[in-house]
Image (cartoon, rainbow, N blue to C red):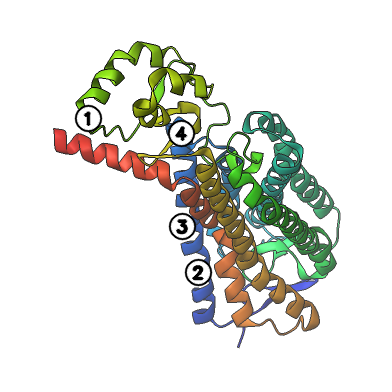
Protein backbone atom coordinates (compact mmCIF):
# COMPACT_ATOMS: atom_id res chain seq x y z
CA UNK A 1 0.00 0.00 0.00
CA UNK A 2 1.19 3.50 -0.75
CA UNK A 3 1.66 5.67 2.29
CA UNK A 4 -0.09 9.04 2.19
CA UNK A 5 -0.23 12.14 4.33
CA UNK A 6 -3.06 14.41 3.25
CA UNK A 7 -2.80 18.17 3.54
CA UNK A 8 -5.36 20.40 1.86
CA UNK A 9 -5.60 19.91 -1.86
CA UNK A 10 -3.25 17.04 -2.43
CA UNK A 11 -1.82 13.88 -0.95
CA UNK A 12 1.90 13.37 -0.96
CA UNK A 13 5.04 11.66 0.28
CA UNK A 14 5.29 8.14 -1.07
CA UNK A 15 3.17 6.92 -3.95
CA UNK A 16 4.78 3.46 -3.90
CA UNK A 17 5.94 0.98 -1.24
CA UNK A 18 9.30 1.76 0.44
CA UNK A 19 11.37 -0.74 -1.56
CA UNK A 20 10.08 0.70 -4.85
CA UNK A 21 10.70 4.26 -3.70
CA UNK A 22 14.23 3.21 -2.77
CA UNK A 23 14.81 1.99 -6.34
CA UNK A 24 13.67 5.37 -7.64
CA UNK A 25 16.00 7.19 -5.24
CA UNK A 26 18.99 5.06 -6.30
CA UNK A 27 18.23 5.59 -10.01
CA UNK A 28 17.93 9.36 -9.59
CA UNK A 29 21.07 9.77 -7.53
CA UNK A 30 23.28 7.46 -9.58
CA UNK A 31 22.20 9.18 -12.81
CA UNK A 32 22.71 12.61 -11.23
CA UNK A 33 26.21 11.79 -10.02
CA UNK A 34 27.24 10.40 -13.41
CA UNK A 35 25.89 13.48 -15.16
CA UNK A 36 27.64 15.86 -12.76
CA UNK A 37 30.92 14.02 -13.39
CA UNK A 38 30.29 14.20 -17.15
CA UNK A 39 29.57 17.94 -16.96
CA UNK A 40 32.72 18.54 -14.90
CA UNK A 41 34.70 16.58 -17.50
CA UNK A 42 33.37 18.85 -20.25
CA UNK A 43 34.03 22.03 -18.29
CA UNK A 44 37.48 20.95 -17.11
CA UNK A 45 38.87 19.81 -20.47
CA UNK A 46 37.31 22.75 -22.31
CA UNK A 47 39.00 25.21 -19.97
CA UNK A 48 42.25 23.21 -19.90
CA UNK A 49 43.21 22.84 -23.58
CA UNK A 50 42.60 25.07 -26.59
CA UNK A 51 42.08 22.11 -28.95
CA UNK A 52 38.81 21.26 -27.18
CA UNK A 53 37.32 24.68 -27.97
CA UNK A 54 35.52 23.62 -31.16
CA UNK A 55 32.17 25.26 -31.94
CA UNK A 56 29.98 22.29 -31.03
CA UNK A 57 32.02 21.78 -27.85
CA UNK A 58 31.47 25.40 -26.90
CA UNK A 59 27.72 24.83 -26.86
CA UNK A 60 28.09 21.64 -24.84
CA UNK A 61 30.26 23.60 -22.42
CA UNK A 62 27.54 26.26 -22.04
CA UNK A 63 24.89 23.58 -21.54
CA UNK A 64 26.95 21.97 -18.78
CA UNK A 65 26.19 24.77 -16.32
CA UNK A 66 22.47 24.09 -16.60
CA UNK A 67 23.07 20.33 -16.37
CA UNK A 68 24.90 20.73 -13.07
CA UNK A 69 22.10 22.85 -11.61
CA UNK A 70 19.45 20.40 -12.82
CA UNK A 71 21.37 17.45 -11.41
CA UNK A 72 21.83 19.25 -8.10
CA UNK A 73 18.04 19.26 -7.87
CA UNK A 74 17.51 15.65 -9.01
CA UNK A 75 20.20 14.44 -6.62
CA UNK A 76 17.95 15.40 -3.67
CA UNK A 77 15.39 12.95 -5.09
CA UNK A 78 12.46 12.41 -2.66
CA UNK A 79 14.30 13.70 0.42
CA UNK A 80 12.48 17.06 0.26
CA UNK A 81 8.96 15.75 -0.44
CA UNK A 82 7.76 16.10 3.14
CA UNK A 83 5.40 19.01 3.76
CA UNK A 84 5.87 21.79 6.25
CA UNK A 85 4.26 20.70 9.53
CA UNK A 86 3.23 24.26 10.40
CA UNK A 87 1.14 25.14 7.36
CA UNK A 88 0.88 21.92 5.35
CA UNK A 89 2.58 23.50 2.34
CA UNK A 90 5.78 22.41 0.60
CA UNK A 91 9.03 23.41 2.24
CA UNK A 92 11.38 25.95 0.68
CA UNK A 93 13.73 23.08 -0.21
CA UNK A 94 10.93 21.38 -2.13
CA UNK A 95 10.07 24.58 -3.96
CA UNK A 96 13.75 25.14 -4.80
CA UNK A 97 13.99 21.65 -6.26
CA UNK A 98 10.90 22.20 -8.39
CA UNK A 99 12.22 25.57 -9.54
CA UNK A 100 15.58 24.12 -10.65
CA UNK A 101 13.95 21.20 -12.46
CA UNK A 102 11.53 23.49 -14.31
CA UNK A 103 14.35 25.90 -15.19
CA UNK A 104 17.21 23.69 -16.36
CA UNK A 105 15.97 20.31 -17.55
CA UNK A 106 14.15 21.83 -20.58
CA UNK A 107 17.14 24.05 -21.40
CA UNK A 108 19.09 21.06 -22.68
CA UNK A 109 16.60 20.57 -25.51
CA UNK A 110 17.06 24.24 -26.41
CA UNK A 111 20.84 23.81 -26.54
CA UNK A 112 20.38 20.82 -28.87
CA UNK A 113 18.24 23.02 -31.11
CA UNK A 114 20.98 25.68 -31.14
CA UNK A 115 23.49 23.04 -32.25
CA UNK A 116 21.17 22.02 -35.06
CA UNK A 117 20.71 25.67 -36.03
CA UNK A 118 24.49 26.12 -36.16
CA UNK A 119 24.76 23.18 -38.55
CA UNK A 120 21.94 24.54 -40.68
CA UNK A 121 23.30 28.09 -40.92
CA UNK A 122 26.82 26.86 -41.61
CA UNK A 123 25.64 24.61 -44.39
CA UNK A 124 23.16 26.97 -46.04
CA UNK A 125 24.51 30.41 -45.15
CA UNK A 126 28.28 29.75 -45.19
CA UNK A 127 28.90 30.73 -41.58
CA UNK A 128 32.35 29.93 -40.21
CA UNK A 129 33.13 28.73 -36.67
CA UNK A 130 34.39 32.23 -35.91
CA UNK A 131 31.23 33.97 -37.12
CA UNK A 132 29.03 31.58 -35.15
CA UNK A 133 30.54 32.72 -31.85
CA UNK A 134 28.60 35.98 -32.05
CA UNK A 135 25.38 33.97 -31.65
CA UNK A 136 26.42 32.37 -28.37
CA UNK A 137 25.23 35.27 -26.20
CA UNK A 138 21.83 35.03 -27.85
CA UNK A 139 21.81 31.29 -27.29
CA UNK A 140 22.51 31.82 -23.59
CA UNK A 141 19.59 34.23 -23.33
CA UNK A 142 17.24 31.86 -25.16
CA UNK A 143 18.31 28.56 -23.57
CA UNK A 144 18.42 29.83 -19.99
CA UNK A 145 16.29 32.97 -20.17
CA UNK A 146 13.09 31.41 -21.52
CA UNK A 147 12.87 28.53 -19.00
CA UNK A 148 13.85 30.85 -16.16
CA UNK A 149 11.07 33.25 -17.12
CA UNK A 150 8.52 30.44 -16.86
CA UNK A 151 9.89 29.01 -13.61
CA UNK A 152 10.12 32.45 -11.99
CA UNK A 153 6.53 33.15 -12.99
CA UNK A 154 5.50 29.89 -11.33
CA UNK A 155 7.44 30.85 -8.21
CA UNK A 156 5.73 34.23 -7.96
CA UNK A 157 2.29 32.75 -8.53
CA UNK A 158 3.05 29.91 -6.12
CA UNK A 159 2.81 32.15 -3.08
CA UNK A 160 -0.58 33.51 -4.16
CA UNK A 161 -2.45 30.30 -4.95
CA UNK A 162 -4.45 28.13 -2.58
CA UNK A 163 -2.87 24.96 -3.93
CA UNK A 164 0.89 25.47 -4.37
CA UNK A 165 2.31 25.15 -7.88
CA UNK A 166 5.65 23.73 -6.76
CA UNK A 167 5.26 20.68 -4.58
CA UNK A 168 5.56 16.88 -4.40
CA UNK A 169 5.30 15.17 -7.80
CA UNK A 170 5.85 11.45 -7.07
CA UNK A 171 9.58 11.12 -7.83
CA UNK A 172 10.66 14.62 -6.75
CA UNK A 173 9.26 18.08 -6.17
CA UNK A 174 8.03 19.81 -9.28
CA UNK A 175 4.69 21.15 -10.60
CA UNK A 176 1.95 19.49 -8.57
CA UNK A 177 -0.86 17.36 -9.94
CA UNK A 178 -3.40 20.16 -9.49
CA UNK A 179 -1.61 22.03 -12.28
CA UNK A 180 -1.08 19.11 -14.60
CA UNK A 181 -1.94 21.27 -17.60
CA UNK A 182 1.08 23.47 -16.79
CA UNK A 183 3.34 20.44 -17.07
CA UNK A 184 2.10 19.83 -20.59
CA UNK A 185 1.91 23.48 -21.68
CA UNK A 186 5.24 24.69 -20.25
CA UNK A 187 7.41 21.59 -20.07
CA UNK A 188 6.60 18.55 -22.18
CA UNK A 189 4.80 20.35 -25.00
CA UNK A 190 7.56 22.88 -25.77
CA UNK A 191 10.31 20.29 -25.38
CA UNK A 192 8.63 17.86 -27.78
CA UNK A 193 8.10 20.69 -30.29
CA UNK A 194 11.80 21.60 -30.00
CA UNK A 195 12.84 17.98 -30.51
CA UNK A 196 10.67 17.75 -33.63
CA UNK A 197 12.06 21.02 -34.99
CA UNK A 198 15.61 19.87 -34.30
CA UNK A 199 14.96 16.63 -36.11
CA UNK A 200 13.59 18.50 -39.13
CA UNK A 201 16.71 20.69 -39.30
CA UNK A 202 18.93 17.63 -39.29
CA UNK A 203 16.80 16.00 -42.02
CA UNK A 204 17.19 19.11 -44.21
CA UNK A 205 20.95 19.16 -43.65
CA UNK A 206 21.27 15.43 -44.23
CA UNK A 207 19.39 15.63 -47.53
CA UNK A 208 21.62 18.51 -48.60
CA UNK A 209 24.68 16.52 -47.56
CA UNK A 210 23.63 13.51 -49.63
CA UNK A 211 23.05 15.71 -52.68
CA UNK A 212 26.35 17.58 -52.46
CA UNK A 213 28.69 14.97 -51.00
CA UNK A 214 29.86 13.49 -54.28
CA UNK A 215 30.50 16.92 -55.77
CA UNK A 216 32.30 18.15 -52.66
CA UNK A 217 34.65 15.19 -52.55
CA UNK A 218 35.91 16.13 -56.02
CA UNK A 219 36.04 19.85 -55.28
CA UNK A 220 39.39 19.96 -53.54
CA UNK A 221 39.85 23.70 -53.61
CA UNK A 222 36.44 24.63 -52.11
CA UNK A 223 34.91 21.93 -49.91
CA UNK A 224 31.36 22.44 -48.67
CA UNK A 225 31.57 24.63 -45.53
CA UNK A 226 29.82 22.08 -43.30
CA UNK A 227 32.65 19.62 -43.75
CA UNK A 228 35.12 21.97 -42.11
CA UNK A 229 32.76 23.06 -39.35
CA UNK A 230 33.88 22.51 -35.80
CA UNK A 231 35.67 19.22 -36.26
CA UNK A 232 39.31 20.14 -36.19
CA UNK A 233 39.69 21.08 -39.86
CA UNK A 234 41.11 24.58 -39.99
CA UNK A 235 39.02 26.83 -42.24
CA UNK A 236 41.89 29.28 -42.49
CA UNK A 237 44.75 27.11 -43.67
CA UNK A 238 48.19 28.50 -43.07
CA UNK A 239 50.06 30.05 -45.94
CA UNK A 240 52.53 27.47 -47.15
CA UNK A 241 53.74 29.60 -50.04
CA UNK A 242 57.38 28.98 -49.12
CA UNK A 243 57.03 25.25 -48.51
CA UNK A 244 56.59 22.34 -50.87
CA UNK A 245 55.78 18.73 -50.08
CA UNK A 246 58.01 16.30 -51.96
CA UNK A 247 56.92 12.69 -51.75
CA UNK A 248 57.93 9.36 -53.26
CA UNK A 249 61.25 10.58 -54.64
CA UNK A 250 62.58 7.29 -55.94
CA UNK A 251 65.09 7.96 -58.73
CA UNK A 252 66.80 5.03 -60.40
CA UNK A 253 69.55 6.74 -62.38
CA UNK A 254 72.53 8.70 -61.16
CA UNK A 255 72.05 11.23 -63.95
CA UNK A 256 68.53 12.06 -62.82
CA UNK A 257 69.72 12.50 -59.20
CA UNK A 258 72.37 14.95 -60.35
CA UNK A 259 69.88 16.89 -62.44
CA UNK A 260 67.40 17.01 -59.57
CA UNK A 261 70.09 18.38 -57.24
CA UNK A 262 71.24 20.91 -59.82
CA UNK A 263 67.69 22.16 -60.33
CA UNK A 264 66.86 22.42 -56.60
CA UNK A 265 67.18 26.20 -56.63
CA UNK A 266 64.93 26.51 -59.67
CA UNK A 267 62.26 24.26 -58.16
CA UNK A 268 62.21 26.17 -54.89
CA UNK A 269 61.47 29.39 -56.75
CA UNK A 270 58.00 28.14 -57.74
CA UNK A 271 55.14 29.39 -55.61
CA UNK A 272 53.48 26.36 -54.03
CA UNK A 273 50.04 27.78 -54.69
CA UNK A 274 50.67 27.75 -58.45
CA UNK A 275 50.71 24.49 -60.40
CA UNK A 276 53.85 23.62 -62.33
CA UNK A 277 53.38 24.30 -66.02
CA UNK A 278 54.42 22.39 -69.10
CA UNK A 279 57.14 25.02 -69.53
CA UNK A 280 58.73 23.80 -66.30
CA UNK A 281 58.61 20.24 -67.55
CA UNK A 282 60.34 21.24 -70.75
CA UNK A 283 63.08 23.05 -68.78
CA UNK A 284 63.84 19.96 -66.72
CA UNK A 285 63.58 17.44 -69.51
CA UNK A 286 61.68 14.23 -69.93
CA UNK A 287 63.71 12.25 -67.38
CA UNK A 288 62.99 14.82 -64.70
CA UNK A 289 59.28 15.02 -65.31
CA UNK A 290 58.64 12.32 -62.71
CA UNK A 291 60.27 14.42 -60.00
CA UNK A 292 58.32 17.51 -60.97
CA UNK A 293 55.05 15.63 -60.74
CA UNK A 294 55.89 14.55 -57.20
CA UNK A 295 56.16 18.16 -56.04
CA UNK A 296 52.71 19.04 -54.74
CA UNK A 297 51.34 22.27 -53.37
CA UNK A 298 51.21 22.04 -49.59
CA UNK A 299 47.77 23.63 -49.48
CA UNK A 300 46.39 20.40 -50.96
CA UNK A 301 47.64 18.32 -48.02
CA UNK A 302 46.22 18.03 -44.52
CA UNK A 303 48.00 16.20 -41.73
CA UNK A 304 45.45 13.98 -39.94
CA UNK A 305 46.51 11.42 -37.38
CA UNK A 306 50.06 11.49 -38.70
CA UNK A 307 48.93 10.83 -42.27
CA UNK A 308 48.81 13.22 -45.21
CA UNK A 309 45.36 13.42 -46.75
CA UNK A 310 43.76 15.78 -49.22
CA UNK A 311 41.22 18.36 -48.03
CA UNK A 312 38.50 16.39 -49.79
CA UNK A 313 39.38 13.25 -47.82
CA UNK A 314 39.57 15.22 -44.59
CA UNK A 315 36.26 16.87 -45.48
CA UNK A 316 34.59 13.51 -45.85
CA UNK A 317 35.92 12.37 -42.47
CA UNK A 318 34.69 15.54 -40.81
CA UNK A 319 31.29 15.20 -42.43
CA UNK A 320 30.89 11.66 -41.14
CA UNK A 321 31.96 12.74 -37.67
CA UNK A 322 29.48 15.58 -37.56
CA UNK A 323 26.64 13.43 -38.83
CA UNK A 324 27.49 10.94 -36.08
CA UNK A 325 27.39 13.77 -33.56
CA UNK A 326 24.01 14.89 -34.83
CA UNK A 327 22.70 11.34 -34.53
CA UNK A 328 23.96 11.12 -30.94
CA UNK A 329 22.31 14.41 -29.99
CA UNK A 330 19.03 13.15 -31.40
CA UNK A 331 19.43 9.76 -29.69
CA UNK A 332 20.10 11.35 -26.29
CA UNK A 333 17.00 13.53 -26.62
CA UNK A 334 14.88 10.51 -27.49
CA UNK A 335 16.28 8.41 -24.64
CA UNK A 336 15.70 11.20 -22.12
CA UNK A 337 12.29 12.42 -23.17
CA UNK A 338 10.28 9.53 -24.60
CA UNK A 339 9.94 7.50 -21.35
CA UNK A 340 9.14 10.57 -19.27
CA UNK A 341 6.61 11.82 -21.85
CA UNK A 342 4.85 8.44 -21.91
CA UNK A 343 4.77 8.54 -18.11
CA UNK A 344 3.20 12.00 -18.20
CA UNK A 345 0.51 10.90 -20.68
CA UNK A 346 -0.26 7.85 -18.58
CA UNK A 347 -0.45 10.04 -15.48
CA UNK A 348 -2.95 12.35 -17.14
CA UNK A 349 -5.10 9.42 -18.27
CA UNK A 350 -5.08 7.70 -14.89
CA UNK A 351 -3.91 10.23 -12.28
CA UNK A 352 -4.99 8.20 -9.25
CA UNK A 353 -2.85 5.16 -10.09
CA UNK A 354 0.75 6.15 -10.96
CA UNK A 355 2.66 3.52 -12.90
CA UNK A 356 5.78 2.41 -11.06
CA UNK A 357 7.63 1.20 -14.15
CA UNK A 358 7.14 4.43 -16.06
CA UNK A 359 8.03 6.57 -13.05
CA UNK A 360 11.19 4.52 -12.56
CA UNK A 361 12.06 4.95 -16.24
CA UNK A 362 11.61 8.73 -15.94
CA UNK A 363 13.76 8.74 -12.80
CA UNK A 364 16.50 6.88 -14.69
CA UNK A 365 16.63 8.92 -17.89
CA UNK A 366 15.83 12.53 -16.94
CA UNK A 367 18.98 13.03 -14.82
CA UNK A 368 21.19 11.57 -17.58
CA UNK A 369 21.29 14.59 -19.90
CA UNK A 370 24.68 15.71 -18.58
CA UNK A 371 26.11 12.23 -19.12
CA UNK A 372 24.70 12.13 -22.64
CA UNK A 373 26.34 15.47 -23.45
CA UNK A 374 29.64 14.21 -22.05
CA UNK A 375 29.46 11.15 -24.34
CA UNK A 376 28.82 13.39 -27.36
CA UNK A 377 31.66 15.67 -26.27
CA UNK A 378 33.97 12.67 -25.98
CA UNK A 379 33.03 11.47 -29.48
CA UNK A 380 33.68 14.85 -31.11
CA UNK A 381 36.94 15.24 -29.16
CA UNK A 382 38.21 11.68 -29.41
CA UNK A 383 41.17 12.61 -31.61
CA UNK A 384 42.29 15.34 -29.20
CA UNK A 385 41.92 12.99 -26.23
CA UNK A 386 43.90 10.31 -28.05
CA UNK A 387 46.69 12.74 -28.97
CA UNK A 388 46.98 13.96 -25.37
CA UNK A 389 47.18 10.38 -24.11
CA UNK A 390 49.82 9.49 -26.71
CA UNK A 391 51.94 12.53 -25.86
CA UNK A 392 51.76 11.69 -22.17
CA UNK A 393 52.72 8.08 -22.86
CA UNK A 394 55.73 9.21 -24.91
CA UNK A 395 56.79 11.56 -22.11
CA UNK A 396 56.55 8.77 -19.56
CA UNK A 397 58.68 6.48 -21.73
CA UNK A 398 61.23 9.22 -22.34
CA UNK A 399 61.58 9.87 -18.63
Is residue 336 in view from this perspective? yes
Label 1, residues with CA under 10 Å away: few <14, some 14-19, many ≥20: few
Q: Residue at x 66, y 62 (%)?
A: 173
Q: Which residue is mark 1?
A: 253
Q: Is residue 213 above or below residue 255?
A: below
Q: How far is the residue under mark 3 from the one under mark 1?
A: 65 Å
Q: Which mark is residue 27?
A: 2
Q: Residue at x 76, y 38 (%)?
A: 125
Q: Nearer the viewer, mark 2 or mark 4?
A: 4
Say whether residue 146 is left or right of residue 306. right
Callout 3: SS? helix
Callout 2: SS? helix
Q: Is residue 134 above or below residue 73?
A: above
Q: Which residue is mark 3?
A: 34
Say whether residue 334 is left or right of residue 156. left
Q: How far is the residue under mark 2 from the one under mark 4?
A: 50 Å
Q: Residue at x 38, y 42 (%)?
A: 305
Q: Nearer the viewer, mark 2 or mark 1?
A: 1
Amino acid sequence: MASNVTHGYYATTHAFPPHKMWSIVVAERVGSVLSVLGSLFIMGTFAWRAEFKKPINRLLFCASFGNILANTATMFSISVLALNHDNGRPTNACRAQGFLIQSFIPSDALWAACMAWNVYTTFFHNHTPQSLQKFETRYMVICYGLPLTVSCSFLIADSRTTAPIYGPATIWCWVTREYDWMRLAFFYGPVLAIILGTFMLYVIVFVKYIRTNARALHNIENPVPLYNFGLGFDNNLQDFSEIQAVTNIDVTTTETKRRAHADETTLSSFNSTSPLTSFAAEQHGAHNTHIIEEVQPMHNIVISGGQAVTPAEQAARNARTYLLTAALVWLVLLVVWIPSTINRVQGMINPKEPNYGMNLAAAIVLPLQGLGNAIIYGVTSRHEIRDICLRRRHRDRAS
